[in-house]
Image (cartoon, coloured by chain):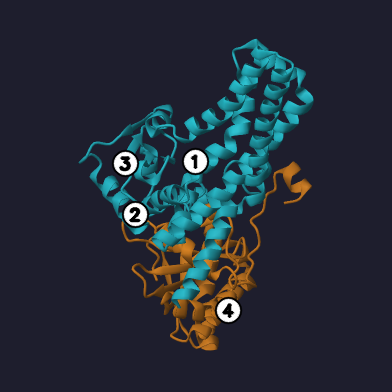
Chain colours: A orange, B cyan
Amino acid sequence: MGLTDILFGRKRLPKAQQEKLFAISTTRITLETELGLKPTGDAAVVFKPLSAAEFVRAENELQELLDSVAQEAHSKVERRGDEFGFEWLIVRDNDFEELVAGVHLVASELAAHGFGEQLLAAAFKFKGGEHPVYFIYGFKRGAWWPFVPTGDGKGRDNSEELELKAKLEKELPIEQDLTRWLALFDAPI
Amino acid sequence: MIVALGIVGLIYLAAEAIMLAVTIGAAAEGNVGAALGGLMFACAIVVGLVAQIRKPEGLILRTARARLLEPGEERELQALVQRVAAQADLSEPRVALIHSWAPNALTAARKPETAVVAVTTELLRRLEPKELEAVVAHELAHVANRDGPVMTFVSGPAMALSAFWHSDDSRAKVSYILLFWITIPLHVITLLLMWTVSRYREYAADRGSALITGAPQDLISALVKIEGSAPPRSDLRGGLAVNAFCIVSGRNRWRRVELVMDHPPVQKRIRRLEALARELGKAVA
């Protein structure tokens, strides 16, 4: 945010940072060997069209986008909404490399269609622990954080999340401000 | 650590030597009153230190407004402390509760057999059982490391100088001021030594906790919750949360100089625990 933006009150949404999305690929081995966590093959890109006009445009373009991504990435792609009014573009692929590539492609296509500033997060789901583990990539900050919902209301297992941070931060750009590790409860993946 | 303890030891020896020199000098001049005064001061240093080290836990607990729990009271907490003590191979300590809004815990222990672990009601409310276990393990690591007597020894000179300055007796305060060229530098040095040793013992207790529970992440989780910087329960998609996500700068944090901290910065403690978590992870793997 520049000085003129401050003076004239023109705060803009930060642009999406996609370059660190691929970092999750290399952590899969650590997750499996050290923590017994395996990808479920499900991941998603979460975004929100800000205006009604954009939503109509999104309606028209999204299906086209999904078809092209599915064809290019060889992954299954579907679309879901949630109670917060966000759109989830869900990518399913048992090959983790393909899954990451698919999510990156969806994010890139959305950015190319003018939705870059509305990209909120990407989420990858893992299983093998007591609770499901999500790795969330915040497009605004270009950083990752773990999210382990306990399934008990809005409960989350902070200890496990912090253990994941400790073991993965050498290979994954982890968000250092823990207060920004916001949750994605009831994620449709 | 050894250097700091050595310097404190030298300060005690120097104080003793000065008092004995005053005693001998006065005795040689036939000034019996001054000789007795010097001798009394020399003895008072040793007696005062021993008395502080042997100070009953009850006195410390009264200062912290802690109440010892009766058997059967707060069963889960007492069982948890018992379990951690067994894991640490320590005698079962007594458990006390402090009614406070601040999440905290403390230990009073002349020796492991008479140790008391006190926790605040807010700590019980805020932490999950495994995080509480990690905090109790941290306190018991202080007991196992004999931090009570060590810190009493280290803090003695600084406390004595503070007592001079805060004394109700105006003569003590005047002496402190008149001898400012020695009292003030000595006071600063002894305080810095005390804080340095205290921070070192905190790191050691953190490590002890991690080794007792085998889960450094539980202590990290407890520390961030106590500090108020834990991952939030709010959702990324919530209005406030999304706005927060767009804010460029982080929270304003009042920075403190580590040199004058009695506890290390939480972020540094977390870094060390994270390194330990990685070590423990590799050992298991």
Q: Quadrant of residue A126?
A: bottom left
* For marks 3 and 1 on the same chain, the one whose residue lies earlier in the sequence: 3
Label 3, label 1: how far apart the Cα atoms are: 18 Å
Report which residue position mark 4 lands on: A105
Query: Which-is-in-front pick, marks 1 and 2?
Result: 1
Q: Nearer the viewer, residue B121 or A168?
A: B121
* Chain assignment, label 2: B
Query: Which-is-in-front pick, marks 3 and 1?
Result: 1
| Amino acid bearing label 3 | Arg
Q: Residue at the location (58% across, 47% down)?
A: B199
**Relative to B220, is A91 above or below?**
below
On the same chain: label 1 and label 2? yes
Report which residue position mark 3 lands on: B94
Label 1, label 4: how far apart the Cα atoms are: 62 Å
On the same chain: label 2 and label 4? no
* Chain assignment, label 3: B
Relative to B260, B218 lies left or right: left
Report which residue position mark 2 lands on: B84
Q: Nearer the viewer, residue B30 or B85?
A: B30
**Relative to B263, is B164 above or below?**
above
For the C terminus of chain B, the image quarter is: bottom left
Q: Are marks 1 and 4 in contact (CB under 8 Å)?
A: no
Report which residue position mark 1 lands on: B149
**Relative to A3, is B218 above or below?**
below
